[in-house]
Amino acid sequence: LAEARQQLENIELLGAKHPEVVKARAGLALTDRSTDDALGRLGDALARSENADDVELAFLRAEGFVQKNQLPQARSELEAILKKKPDSARALHALGNLHQMQKEADLAAGRYEEALKADPEHASSAVELAAIELLIRKDLTKGQVAIDQALADDRRDKLGPAELGKGL
């Protein structure tokens, strides 16, 4: 993170309104929990017509809405991404996470399944689906299939430490 902050000076040479600069600044603001700062930057950037289709800006804004517990706004942002990229496993997974936050396990499982259909290698969706099958639905057979899928040797390197720990 320290190196990212240091390299920001080089990125900023592109100009304060350049989308990559906005993403870097907003990402750091979200990391620092300066959510209002991030949302302001992202809203301004997305209001510019040249950035209207930049889904990375939209993902960052959805993340900011989640940090502020503004889940309907986050859902709207993610659904707008899906209109542009219907096969976005990342957006489908994030919607699954929103459903989990609202204790909607069946809807969450459906989104994780959609994410896996969009990208069978989306290991984090397989881990979350396995958790729902095992811990909520108590379906050991489906849970084991999902765990095996998530923890396959060719997928383990795609999991972060938290996901790997949850899967194990």
Image (cartoon, rainbow, N blue to C red):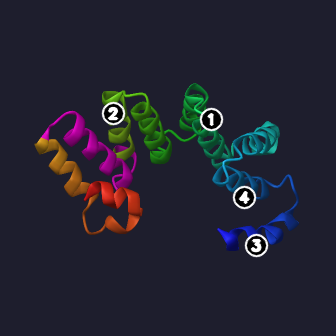
Image disc number at residue 68 = 1
Q: Residues within 10 Å of mark 1 (few under 14, many from 20)?
A: some
Q: Is residue 133 magenta?
A: yes
| Nearer mark to the viewer, of 2 and 1 | 1
Element type at mark 1: loop
Residue type highlighted by circle 4: Ala
- Percent across and percent down for residue 45 are 79, 44
Q: Is residue 36 magenta?
A: no
Is residue 48 positioned above or below 121 on the image?
Answer: above
Task: Tell me: 112 left or right of 147.
Answer: right
Residue type highlighted by circle 2: Gly
Mark closer to the chain start, 2 or 1: 1
Element type at mark 3: helix
Image disc number at residue 6 = 3
Between the residue at mark 2 and the residue at mark 3, the CA separation in whole angstroms equals 41 Å
Q: Residue at label 2?
A: 110
Image disc number at residue 24 = 4
